């Protein structure tokens, strides 16, 4: 399909089929559309219901090029690998993830055909899909990498990959220093993402990044300036910091993706609470907790004396175990399944956030100006915890020792961490003040003239120039 001078840039987005990747990718598409880009989300038919409402609402609200949705079906040969027909990590158990990624690999050919048919000016794809770099490169289409992390975890992971310091320690709990960082950061083997057990795959991801146009990062400069500079310092990749992308919507119906039938009941409950009195608790769309751990959380929240708004993952967490003490729901709001996190975090009643430290949740908490109780479970979450607790100083660790996912955190530890974040005193006030300062900086970054706004402009100008160079048309 040909492109004429003056046509809007056509950018395709291919996110990992998981809420934590699809939501920020859609938010980036919205931000780009407001700058005159024609954006298309590519996903599988089973994920259309998760995106269609938000896309339709965006298209009816903004007077910009439309966001399109292209569906890429799984080949019949891998249907047996999709548990109960599910096509999203958020609706399946962790034990099904390996089969799902094998099924995703079967989309290589169909995606290459789709790109060849539509010839977009750019492909934004997940880093975990390194094969998309070859498909784009073969067609002369610039590819942007989306990692889903911030600059700090990207720098930490690059250091771990380059220096392999964890190879020299004798146990999973022995600390080691992460080399080459502006701050003295220590980790243990138990805190390292499982992906570091797959060095060959990490090498393939790095090679794919070298073939790519650059990296788009959901962060803002003032949150982690030293790491923003370090990450894109040569020989690092070209990178554009475009976040927090959760601020792409100002309307409650858009923030968080959709309205729930209980939306108004939840807001009414929050409206009845005093300012900064409620602790919000959520462990994301993928993390699974045992019934025993859920009960310790429940009893810890009760012991803290704070009203709470607690979202419990429907799949895996709540099945078959008696974890909810009688009478607990009288002290707080327990939501099974999903709630509009960005809306809840920005409610005046919410004064603290118990989080698994996924990057989206981390950045949403920062943008809301809410100090956090940090409770990482896997992937890069332990690294994000160190950013919150050791670098920017707005988090309190729930764990008194080390420990991985299997370590049950006690009710006493839960209550103590909540009290530290929600209580008074100089330390708690300092965390609240810093959290609000970062929230102000986050909003300034995405406004016209802000650092993220300017990075988007620079990126789109470079993509337009690259298109002009390929097609011989005049650049911007």
Image (spheres, rainbow, N blue to C red):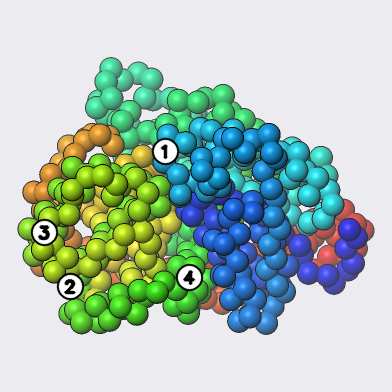
Q: Quadrant of residue 6?
A: bottom right
**Does residue 52 show up?**
yes
Q: Are marks 4 and 1 in contact (CB under 8 Å)?
A: no
Where does the image place residue 311, in percent across and percent down from the top left?
Answer: 30, 60
Asked if the residue under mark 3 is in contact with the one under mark 4, i.e. CB atoms within 8 Å, the reply is no
Task: Bin the neighbour count of mark 1 within 10 Å (Cα to Cα): few under 14, some 14-19, many 20 and up.
Answer: few
Front of the two marks 2 and 3:
3
Instruction: Locate the C terminus by quadrant.
Output: bottom right
Residue at the spot of label 4:
258
Which secondary structure lies at badge 3? Answer: loop
Looking at the image, tell me whether mark 2 or mark 3 is earlier in sequence order.
2
In the image: residue 80, left or right of residue 399: right
Which element is circle 2 on? loop
Pointer 4 or 3: first along the chain? 4
- Nearer to us of marks 1 and 3 is 3
In space, the residues marked 4 and 1 are separated at their CA atoms by: 25 Å
Residue 246: image x %, image y %? Answer: 47, 66
Residue 336's mark? none
Which residue, given by chain and number where applicable, does mark 3 sit on? 326
Q: CA distance from mark 1 to mark 3?
A: 29 Å
Tell whether 136 sits left or right of 435: right
Q: Please tell me which of labels 2 and 4 falls first in the chain.
A: 4
Residue at 31% over, 59% down? 336
Secondary-structure class at tag 1: helix
* Residue 146, position as x, y percentages in the image: 58, 49
**Distance of label 4 from label 3 (alpha carbons):** 31 Å
At horizontal 20% and vertical 82% (from top left) the residue drawn is 272
Give above or below for 121 relative to 202. below
Q: Earlier in the sequence, mark 2 or mark 1?
A: 1
- Residue of label 2: 277
């Amino acid at each position: 399909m040909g492109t004429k001078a003056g046509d809007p840039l056509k950018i395709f987005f291919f996110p990992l089929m998981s809420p934590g990747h699809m939501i920020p990718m859609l938010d980036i598409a919205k931000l780009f559309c407001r700058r005159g880009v024609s954006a298309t989300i590519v996903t599988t038919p089973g994920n259309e219901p998760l995106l269609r409402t938000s896309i339709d609402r965006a298209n009816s609200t903004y007077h910009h090029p439309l966001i399109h949705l292209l569906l890429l079906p799984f080949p019949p040969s891998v249907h047996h690998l999709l548990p109960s027909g599910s096509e999203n990590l958020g609706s399946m158990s962790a034990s099904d993830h390996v089969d799902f990624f094998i099924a995703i690999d079967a989309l290589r050919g169909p995606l290459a055909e789709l790109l060849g048919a539509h010839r977009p000016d750019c492909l934004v794809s997940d880093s975990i899909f390194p094969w998309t770099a070859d498909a784009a490169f073969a067609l002369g289409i610039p590819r942007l990498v989306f990692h889903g992390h911030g600059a700090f975890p990207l720098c930490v992971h690059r250091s771990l990959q380059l220096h392999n310091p964890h190879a020299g320690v004798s146990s999973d709990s022995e600390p080691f220093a992460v080399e080459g960082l502006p701050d003295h950061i220590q980790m243990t083997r138990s805190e390292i993402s499982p992906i570091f057990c797959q060095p060959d795959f990490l090498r393939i991801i790095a090679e794919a990044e070298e073939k790519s146009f650059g990296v788009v990062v959901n962060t803002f400069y003032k949150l982690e300036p030293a790491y923003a500079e370090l990450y894109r310092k040569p020989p690092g990749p070209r990178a554009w910091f475009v976040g927090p992308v959760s601020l792409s919507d100002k309307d409650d119906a858009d923030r968080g993706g959709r309205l729930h039938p209980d939306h108004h009941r939840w807001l009414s409950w929050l409206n009845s609470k005093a300012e900064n009195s409620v602790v919000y608790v959520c462990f994301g769309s993928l993390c699974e907790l045992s019934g025993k751990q859920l009960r310790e959380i429940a009893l810890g929240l009760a012991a803290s004396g704070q009203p709470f708004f607690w979202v419990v993952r429907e799949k895996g967490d709540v099945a078959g175990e008696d974890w909810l003490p009688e009478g607990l729901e009288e002290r707080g709001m327990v939501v099974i399944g999903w709630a509009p996190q960005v809306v809840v975090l920005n409610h005046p009643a919410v004064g603290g956030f118990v989080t698994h430290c996924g990057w989206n949740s981390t950045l949403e908490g920062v943008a809301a100006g809410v100090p956090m109780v940090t409770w990482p479970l896997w992937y890069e979450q332990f690294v994000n915890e160190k950013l919150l607790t050791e670098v920017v100083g707005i988090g309190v660790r729930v764990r008194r020792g080390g420990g991985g996912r299997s370590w049950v955190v006690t009710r006493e530890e839960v209550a103590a961490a909540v009290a530290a974040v929600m209580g008074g005193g100089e330390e708690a006030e300092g965390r609240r003040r810093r959290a609000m300062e970062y929230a102000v900086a986050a909003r300034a970054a995405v406004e016209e003239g802000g650092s993220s706004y300017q990075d988007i402009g620079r990126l789109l100008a470079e993509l337009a120039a690259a298109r002009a160079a390929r097609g011989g048309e005049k650049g911007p």
